[in-house]
Image (tube, rainbow, N blue to C red):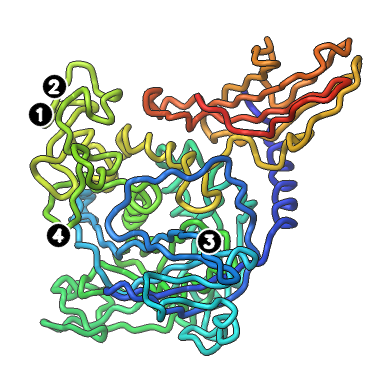
Amino acid sequence: MGIGSHAAVLAAGLLLVGARALAAPAHYVVFEMDGDGRVEPVYYTRVDLQPDRSRQPAQAAAALAGDEVEFRVSRGGADLGTRRVEVPLLRGEFARDPERGDGAIVATPAIDAPRSFVVRIGLDEADAIAFGSDPAQAFDLAALAARADALRLPHSAVPKIERVRGSGSPANRVDVLVFGDGYTAAQESTFHADAAILRDAFFGLTPYREYENFVNWTTAFVPSNQSGADHPPYLAGCNSQGCCGDPDMQSDPFAGQFVDTAFNGRFCTSQIHRLVTVSQGLVLAAAAAYPDWDKIVVVVNDPVYGGSGGTLSVTSTHAQANQIVLHEYGHSFTELADEYSSPYPLFPACSDLSGSTPCEANVTNQATASQVKWRSWFAPGNPIPTPPGAPGVGLFEGARYLATGMYRPVDTQCLMQFLGVPFCPVCRQEYVRTLYRGGWGTPAGGIDLVEPGSESPSPASPVAYVPGTTQTFSVTLLEPTIGDLDVQWLLDGVPVDGAHDASFEFSQSGSSPASRTLELRVIDATPFVSAGMAEGLLVHGRSWTIEVDGDVIFRDGFDIGS
């Protein structure tokens, strides 16, 4: 089933207008957290956020170490419970030899440096938040607003977005915001060209390609006073930001260069030459101009290979550096684990055998074939565990920084093990499941194949119907870029033959039955998700009650499980 491109564009525009009209004022606070877990507000502003019309509660996903912090919300002195916000550790993972196309990953243990995160919460939802049990970590939001310009990042110190391209309604999309650093005002076109290269790499990869329609890719130009990034000079034994103790810096053609950029992009963070970072606080503060973002990527205008992951994904403009973003997005969005076995001292353990923290979707310590979570993907004939060199999906030993006792789905062909290769079927599946499950931002309950607010008539009240007339029911569907939706209308639980479009015409000659239930069921028919692991995530729908000359009991629109 397909929807015409012109109709889709028009519908998207109408949804954007409607969503903007529903935006509500909210607090936007950037916090910094130190290695001891103490937080400090560094930036405050008010923004307009789109409403979260989630179709279902978000389900918890396995999380990499240190990626969430919990805080309590209150209003008028009443405790309204807890919420969580993502605070990943800074990560550095690079190709061993990018100049020769060697995709083997050399990893740096996550760095527990001060980290920044954002709390976004409606003005009518809370007037105070608190972290932990220490009263000093409780914050009155009105008081923060009053002293916003006395915080470490006053409004005058935050780089301003000059132009935004590509933004659409965030009400039912993953919103990726792309900044540049080290681009002067005269280099705006260069930034957009570099961002387009990154976009092509991102959406050229399965399964990102197949679900491009589910992502708002928004570029935001912020000019810098100078081009490039800082390359501190090499100095053996260096332990300050003014120099770099990594011997690899000796081959850096720009060693000793310092430049004035909007977000302070620099190489050799934490004395690791290729670890390129920007000021997280400045980026998150600038992102308040597009407050509905779910993920942020920063392209640093520098040709030397490098990047980083964590709260932000950062990449240089080196031809191979965009692979860092693709891999890191597997961590930050899909919550995938690394599948290589290089040691990572003190990384928190996981287990699918006990009641401890379960392992991520693409790794397991379960070696019993009938209990392996991706068993439906096993290639016929593969022994479990699976010896090296075997084709297809199996159970290959060595993953999550362990050479033994931990397993991955494929031998070598997965982006979570090697840069420059595709995702394996299990990682590919988890991306699709994550899109629909939610938990990565707004909508909290994940993507809905029925665009929220597009239903006509609204399912929020019974539809009065006059016998002998025709009543049209319609919705706007969100289709994968590549792939099909199975659409079915059901009247009183019985499928209607030939009804497979986004609209349905109902008619009835008499007044009986007096109460009818019309259901729309939409299924993503993707082969990327095993039927045994779909968990109802691929099936969405709506329900209307039709009142024919009488009173009926109403049921609101809902999502339908498999």
Whether the residues at callouts 3 and 1 have beta carbons within 8 Å, the answer is no
Q: Which mark is residue 346?
A: 4
Distance in Å between CA atoms under marks 1 and 2:
8 Å
Residue type for callout 4:
Leu
Tag 3's secondary structure? strand
What residue did someone put label 3 on?
Answer: 80
What residue did someone put label 1 on?
Answer: 387
166 vs 242, left or right, is right
Sequence-wise, the earlier of marks 1 and 4 is 4
Residue at left 62%, top 67%?
26
Residue type for callout 1:
Pro
Q: Which mark is residue 383?
A: 2
Q: Is residue 199 visible?
A: yes
Distance in Å between CA atoms under marks 2 and 3:
51 Å
Looking at the image, residue 377 lies above or below residue 135: above
For disc 3, the neighbor class at 10 Å (few under 14, some 14 to 19, many from 20) is: some
Distance in Å between CA atoms under marks 4 and 2:
32 Å
Residue type for callout 3:
Leu
Give coordinates of residue 442: x percent, y percent. Answer: 54, 52
Tag 4's secondary structure? loop
